[in-house]
């Protein structure tokens, strides 16, 4: 299936790359004792952080190390990259990756007040995660990110949530994206409310609808997560509230993606 190229519709260049790893762990802040749970997918703030390591921007630790802050501020990676427009397509069955609980020892000494200073950590990990990532090339910042990704230039090692999980960034290229005038589907994540899902779409043999609240931005006062509910589905959609773009990807398929 090839996407149409019609007069009067918007066309642009986007950076696309495949992001994957053996495991991933994107920590949920709500629980921090006994078990540590992960979001089901890489979220926008984590993806900006990953791109920040590629570009060499500092993170949360730089703010914590400051003795006095005259005014609230974002981590450098977020301040520099927060205007990027991105779309994400997970490569998995029915919207979710396999998960497992891993237990391991943290014996640095100061990790636990227990005798011996040994802390048993139990984390929920995503197994063999893989996503197609698209970044709209509509600014100098986005162009700089594309130059680094395509040129395989990383200042720091990128990882999937924590430095136990190195990230593989492969198959990077610039491709065309064309606005779809009357889209009937969205293959990427989209914010709930941006489209209505047709739950009576009987054309799908194995219909699914995955939904999760994911961090989408940081608040300025405390750099806490702010959330939106995201949807991933193979069902038809209608009443779409934003522009949808078609991309002919490297696997020979045409995808309809929503930037956020």
Image (cartoon, helix red, strand yellow):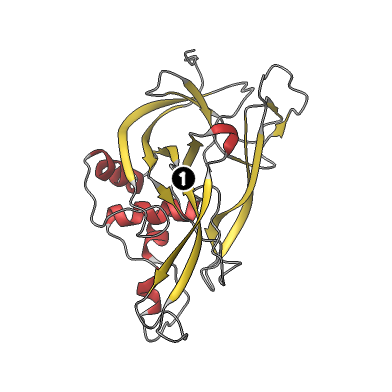
Q: Is residue 73 left or right of residue 147?
A: right
- Furthest-right residue in this view: 200
Instruction: Identify whether 129 is placed above or below 5.
Output: below
Please identify the residue farthest to the front as the structure is shown. Answer: 115
In this rendering, position of residue 205 left or right of residue 137: right
Residue density around tag 1, few if under 14, some if 14–19, many if 20 or more, within 10 Å? some
Q: Which residue is mark 1?
A: 127
Circle 1 SS class: strand
Q: How many marks?
A: 1
Camera-side residue: 146 or 33? 33
Q: Residue at x 70, y 27 (%)?
A: 238
Looking at the picture, how far across and down is residue 248, in whole percent? 43, 21
| The quadrant where residue 130 appears | top left
x, y percent for residue 190? 60, 39
Question: Which of 80 and 56 lies nearest the eye of the viewer?
Answer: 56
Q: Residue at x 47, y 68 (%)?
A: 121
Q: Is residue 125 left or right of residue 151?
A: right
Q: Which of 91 and 237 lies nearest the eye of the viewer? A: 91
In the displayed structure, 142 sits above or below 69; it is above
Q: Is residue 96 left or right of residue 73?
A: right
Compared with residue 247, is residue 32 higher up or lower down, i.e. above or below?
below
- In percent of width and height, residue 32 lies at 56, 70
* Residue located 32% across and 31% down the image: 174
- In this rendering, the answer to whether 187 lies above or below 210 is above
User: Where residue 6 appears, x then y in whole percent?
Assistant: 50, 14
């Amino acid at each position: 299936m090839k996407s149409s190229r019609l007069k009067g519709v918007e066309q642009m260049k986007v950076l696309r790359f495949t992001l994957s790893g053996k495991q991933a762990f994107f920590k949920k802040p709500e629980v921090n004792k006994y078990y540590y749970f992960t979001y089901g997918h890489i979220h926008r703030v984590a993806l900006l952080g990953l791109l920040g390591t590629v570009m060499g921007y500092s993170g949360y630790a730089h703010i914590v190390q400051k003795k006095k802050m005259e005014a609230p501020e974002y981590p450098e990676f977020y301040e520099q990259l927060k205007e990027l427009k991105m779309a994400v397509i997970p490569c998995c069955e029915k919207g979710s990756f396999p998960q497992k609980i891993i237990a391991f020892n943290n014996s640095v000494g100061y990790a636990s007040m227990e005798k011996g200073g040994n802390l048993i950590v139990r984390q929920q990990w995503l197994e063999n995660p893989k996503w197609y990532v698209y970044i709209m090339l509509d600014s100098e910042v986005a162009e700089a990110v594309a130059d680094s990704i395509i040129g395989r230039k990383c200042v720091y090692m990128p990882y999937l949530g924590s430095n136990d999980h190195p990230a593989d960034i492969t198959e990077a290229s610039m491709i065309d994206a064309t606005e779809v005038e009357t889209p009937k589907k969205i293959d990427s994540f989209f914010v709930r409310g941006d489209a209505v899902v047709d739950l009576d779409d009987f054309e799908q043999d194995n219909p699914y609808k995955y939904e999760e609240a994911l961090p989408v931005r940081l608040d300025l006062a405390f750099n806490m997560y702010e959330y939106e509910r995201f949807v991933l589905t193979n069902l038809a959609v209608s009443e779409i509230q934003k522009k949808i773009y078609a991309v002919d990807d490297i696997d020979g398929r045409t995808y309809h993606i929503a930037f956020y």
